Amino acid sequence: MTYFQAVILGIVQGLTEFLPVSSSAHLVIIPWIAKWEYQGLAFDVALHWGTMLAVLAYFWRDWLDLFNAAWRQLRTHERASDGAMERRLRPLAVTPSPKLCEAGWSDGARDEEGESVGKREELFKARLFWGIVLATIPAGIAGLLFEEKAENLFRRPDFMAWPLMAFGILLWIADRWGKQSKNFGAFSLYPCLLVGLAQALAIVPGVSRSGATITAALLLGFKRDVSARFSFLLSTPIIVAAGLLQAKDLTSVALAGPFWAGVGVSALAGFAAIRFLLGYLKSKDLGVFAFYRVCLGLLILLLWAGNPSALSKKLAGQAAQARMTKPEIILTPQAARLKSHVDMLAEKIGERNPYYYKALNQARDYIAAQFQSLGFKPEIQEFKSKDMSMIDDGTAFYNIEVRLSPHPALSPALQSSEGGDRARGPGRHKGRGIEKEGRAEVLIIGAHYDSAPGTPGADDNASGTAVLLELARSFKGRQFSKEIRLVAFSTEEPPSFFTSNMGSYHYARRLKEQGAKVFGMISLEMVGYFNLEPGSQLYPPPLSFFYPKTGNFVGLVGNLKSRKFMKDCAKAWRAGSDFPLETAALPFFISAASLSDHYNFQKEGWPGLMLTDTAFYRNPHYHENTDTPDKLDYERMARVLEALTQTVVSLAEK
């Protein structure tokens, strides 16, 4: 958790906890879109503490008045029949006094029956206190019995989208058709309980505590600002209880800077949100919030439509199967070598990931040996795991790097370096007492060699690793104006995916610390599965309107900042090969733009692209135990390798 993430999530929590738009949904959706790691239980506590401080800071006088009134009532043992109480608590037609109620009371004033207004206000405050206590019970019971189940059931973004939209529409209906005639004086036990039942629905992510309670109050005929104020008062006991209960799970290690940043920022944002909404609703309606909820829900469904789980049923239901390479067919030498690598990784070694640690290291040794057999000296770069699911902290994993140093006579950057720097080796010089990278631009081609849990990983990603190894064969003995680095990354799949345990994360951070000048990075991520049947290619919406429907091509995918690098790659590819290539520069919130190791280079500000057969947009065996070597088309893989070789040569000599 960085300070930047802590501040962003603190603002999100503070605003959305009190605005009727669902904080739980935003705290799942924003990290999902931004591809942040789960912030952890400790930071969840920080966010709850922040909103707890906000609501207490804003309403502490109200709560002091309510508690004192209830306490005085208990001490004097004042009793009244239901009928008398209802008569004594009816709304008053007097000049409003500030703070608790819009239709308040003034000490010394008397109503038409001659009864003291101040005394009736005291009785009302006591009744309101016990009404809030009663209304809190349903939410407390629901939280204890069903919160964990609701969190697990509705945690997926697409499941959250439906409550977001449904309760947005209900909020609009209540805002438009509610009578909005009642003030605080009308809050007897019965409406308090009904609003409390609505609050219990907020255990479902996407509903929104404030959204549900404001909607219920509006449907009961209360004014907008009165509904919002009662909603915030009603939320106080639950927010405080949640913050205190979660405190037991904190450790001294968790109480670091980002934790306190989250507390402070969410408290300030929450206080501002309460103040804004209470003022806003005095003259404006809730339509903008209802509209926002519906639009956000539709956007989530649109983004989710491009995810693996959303497409798996479509792929599984396709009758068409890829035209696969038959065992009896004699492969060309290049295709045969690619197949031998895939067979070794996916069949002989098999599943290889942190849960199959021995197999993962066997794959490492095989890759290193292949590089050595070509005359390279691979560097094995160790990094340690931290907070990896079911894996001990400090477990060692290994990236494998091969460098093709630039030729001094070809590289303008090295020609401008001092001779003493070149004497220490091309691409390196010393500055300020530590070794740093030289000024030659670096072009990185990488592929991860681990497989997803439960799969032998032929296409994902023995195919990318095989192409990487054969790319090294193509470059044996050659030098270019740029430095080329071929890197096999250890951990890309779950449980490392999109966390700091990815091998590419450690590699990119190392480059940044060394001051390397990265020209671009290409990640080889599944390049062996092709299906020549019409309709075999799927897309995230709305890309299906712009790209081919047959899975006979490879794609070059990246974020918008990588567009220039993508154009250079595509131009070089098409100049040297007729193998179909499609390109897509996508916004960061479309997950297809960053589903592999190139994402960690994009995070460091460098161009990063993924070369892929599009994975779950085409391959029904993606992340399944059926992702075996017999499913791949090695002749087309060989053509991809040939086109990639020409592309890299063109880029490296540019």
Image (spheres, rainbow, N blue to C red):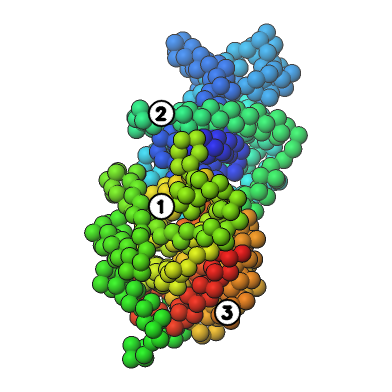
How far apart are the two marked residues, 3 and 1, measured between alpha carbons?
33 Å
Residue 91: where, in percent of width, then height?
66, 25
Query: In the rendered view, does 410 fall on the left or right side of 283?
Result: left
Name above or below for residue 373 compared with residue 333: above
Number of marks in the rendered image? 3
Query: In the rendered view, does 469 fall on the left or right side of 556?
Result: left
Discs 2/1, front: 1
Examine the rendering and report whether any part of residue 191 can be seen. no
**Secondary structure category for the residue under label 1:** loop
Give the amino acid type for the residue marked by disc 3 in the picture: Ser
Q: Nearer the viewer, residue 213 or 70?
A: 213
Q: Nearer the viewer, residue 396 or 146?
A: 396
Residue depicted at 62% across the width and 76% down the height = 575
Query: Which residue is identified by label 3?
Result: 577
How far apart are the two marked residues, 2 and 1, measured between alpha carbons?
25 Å
Q: Residues within 10 Å of mark 2 (few under 14, many from 20)?
A: few
Quarter occupied by residue 327: bottom left
**Secondary structure category for the residue under label 3:** loop
Of the 4 image quadrants, the one containing the C terminus is bottom right
Q: Residues within 10 Å of mark 1 (few under 14, many from 20)?
A: many
Query: In the rendered view, does 501 fall on the left or right side of 232?
Result: left
Give the amino acid type for the residue marked by disc 2 in the picture: Leu
Residue depicted at 56% across the width and 60% down the height = 409
Quarter occupied by residue 358: bottom left
- 2 or 1: tag closer to the N-terminus: 2
Query: Which residue is identified by label 1?
Result: 502
Which numbered disc covers residue 255?
Answer: 2
Residue depicted at 57% across the width and 79% down the height = 577
Give the amino acid type for the residue marked by disc 1 in the picture: Met
Discs 2/3, front: 3
Q: Nearer the viewer, residue 150 or 498?
A: 498
Which numbered disc covers residue 494?
Answer: none
